[in-house]
Image (tube, rainbow, N blue to C red):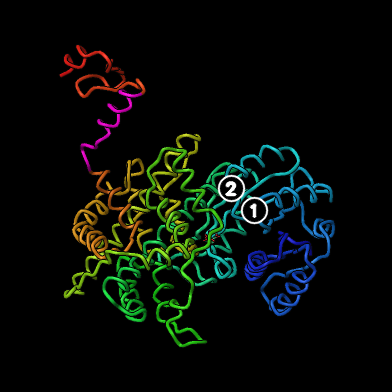
């Protein structure tokens, strides 16, 4: 029986995807350049292959064997590191006899512009397709969020498999089990780079959401003096309300977990230097290049960078001459304020992410359905959260809204909860506890709601030293003026 799909790369993600496909009745062929990965996948597949009602995973020893055991047109999903390796494998597949109507799917965290370039490079040689995957190993195995894009004709063949293996939600937007009926968190989003672009912004939001939760922990620990376990309990309680999310749930669990070696809270034995693979940085750079304000996402990347300067921080901390010490007698009020700050800042992050996607879509000529994007993030992915159902509804009702924070339910919630947000930012500043993402979100919100910003002075400065021109409040915005600053009479005239 020929296989319907194949996986090249049987590492953690590739193997998990293959088993997920097998679980849903698909026959899968698998290949990995590393014989140990091939052997491990073969052994792990044995019990699955014997189960009735499931598909089969056949592990082969070469790309030509892989092509030989696939039904045509062939579907080859790549689960290999992003970058040059993708092109290397595609060239090897072409050399092994790939046909022009065969479909190659990049499932990695590729840079979206690379995906666009590949679509051009391989046109006529194969049907190039992309599917960005979120959810890590567990997601890939039991139901990820799938952001598909690329050759439209390929989607018809890929779609039944992707809809089957994706995470699913019920009518209320709640995740359901792997084999239950529900709405799949998988969608075809558009041309070659769109899936990876949307995933890149997902990761920017992921960075910011993680940083916000980490800042809440830091404030509770450093300013309020709560223990890791107490903070974990508080997060678990908050996870029952509007802050409900996967990242909040795992943070609550992490904080209540002891280190198996010392018995201390596990989080306290982890070195406070954050790593990164770069997708959050791509989002921040893209925001800067696109001219979209995404300050919380950028601050989350900067916060990881500054965390890396451990030695500098340790030395500086010893020389600090003005240590802040703030005693809070009303911890409950502080926690209520922090809860509101976290919720408002989180909504600001989504507003930034969707604004970025919207602006890029306009620049690139993509037609995107924002409600659909919010829907496929409701389960399976790392940023899955209760608020995504509300975001999906908001975009369904007002698809053209300029900013999520202007939509009625969010505008009301954020304006109502802003006092707690301000109080938290002020408390943290007084206690010298850095909360850059929460603070950046507040400034973003305040700028969004400010009729007047000081850009008038910026424009005047630009005109003064560079003759860059300015528009006037009492004339058409498209008309540019310049004041000849060196000539005294003109300066007087303008007054
Ligand atoms: C996901 C994640 C994943 C990402 C890791 C690591 O959606 O499953 O976004 O794709 O690679 O979270 O990211 P960093 O190492 O950059 O933190």
Q: Which mark is residue 218?
A: none
Badge 2 marks a residue whose secondary structure is: loop
Q: Is residue 248 left or right of residue 56?
A: left
- Point out the image quarter for the C terminus: top left
Q: Is residue 490 left or right of residue 98?
A: left
Q: Residue at x 45, y 62 (%)?
A: 312
Which quadrant of the figure has residue 475? top left
Q: Is residue 46 left or right of residue 293?
A: right
Q: Label 1, on which residue?
A: 82
The reply to whether the magenta stretch includes residue 468 is: no
195 to 312, vertically: above or below: above
Residue sitting nearer the eye, 360 or 336? 336
- Point out the image quarter for the N terminus: bottom right
252 to 449, vertically: above or below: below
The reply to whether the magenta stretch includes residue 453 is: yes
Q: Label 2, on which residue?
A: 111
């Amino acid at each position: 029986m020929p296989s319907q799909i194949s996986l090249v790369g049987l590492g953690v993600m590739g193997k998990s995807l293959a088993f997920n496909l097998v679980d849903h009745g698909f026959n899968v062929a698998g290949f990995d350049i590393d014989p140990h990965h091939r052997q491990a996948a073969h052994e792990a597949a044995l019990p699955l292959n014997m189960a009735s009602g499931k598909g089969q995973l056949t592990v082969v020893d070469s790309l030509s064997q892989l092509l030989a055991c696939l039904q045509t047109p062939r579907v080859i999903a790549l689960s290999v590191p992003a970058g040059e390796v993708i092109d290397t494998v595609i060239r090897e597949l072409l050399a092994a006899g790939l046909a022009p109507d065969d479909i190659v799917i990049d499932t990695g965290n590729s840079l979206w512009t690379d995906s666009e370039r590949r679509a051009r490079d391989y046109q006529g040689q194969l049907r190039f397709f992309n599917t960005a995957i979120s959810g890590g190993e567990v997601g890939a195995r039991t139901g990820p969020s799938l952001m598909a894009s690329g050759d439209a004709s390929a989607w018809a063949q890929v779609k039944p498999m992707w809809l089957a293996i994706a995470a699913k939600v019920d009518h209320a937007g709640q995740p359901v089990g792997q084999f239950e009926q529900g709405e799949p968190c998988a969608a075809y989003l558009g041309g070659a780079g769109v899936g990876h672009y949307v995933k890149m912004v997902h990761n920017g939001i992921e960075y910011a959401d993680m940083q916000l939760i980490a800042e809440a922990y830091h404030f509770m620990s450093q300013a309020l003096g709560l223990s890791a376990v107490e903070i974990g309990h508080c997060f678990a309680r908050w996870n029952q309300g509007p802050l409900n999310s996967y990242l909040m749930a795992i943070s609550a669990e992490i904080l209540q977990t002891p280190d198996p070696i010392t018995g201390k809270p596990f989080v306290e034995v982890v070195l406070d230097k954050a790593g990164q693979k770069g997708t959050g940085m791509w989002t921040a750079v893209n925001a800067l290049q696109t001219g979209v304000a995404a300050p919380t996402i950028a601050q989350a990347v900067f916060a990881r960078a500054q965390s890396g300067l451990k030695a500098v921080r340790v030395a500086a901390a010893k020389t600090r001459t003005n240590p802040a010490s703030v005693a809070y007698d009303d911890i409950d009020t502080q926690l209520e304020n922090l809860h509101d700050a976290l919720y408002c800042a989180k909504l600001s992050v989504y507003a930034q992410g969707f604004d970025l996607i919207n602006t890029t879509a306009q620049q690139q000529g993509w037609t995107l359905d924002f409600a659909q994007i919010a829907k496929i993030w409701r389960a399976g992915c790392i940023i899955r959260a209760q608020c995504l159902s509300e975001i999906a509804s908001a975009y369904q009702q007002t698809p053209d809204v300029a900013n999520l924070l202007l939509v009625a339910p969010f505008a009301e919630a954020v304006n109502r909860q802003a006092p707690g947000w301000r109080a938290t930012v002020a408390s943290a500043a007084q206690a010298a506890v850095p909360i850059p993402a929460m603070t950046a979100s507040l400034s973003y919100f305040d700028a969004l709601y400010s009729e007047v910003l000081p850009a008038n002075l910026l424009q005047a400065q630009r005109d003064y030293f560079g003759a860059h021109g300015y528009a006037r409040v009492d004339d058409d915005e498209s008309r540019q003026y310049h004041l000849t600053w060196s000539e005294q009479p003109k300066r007087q005239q303008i007054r």
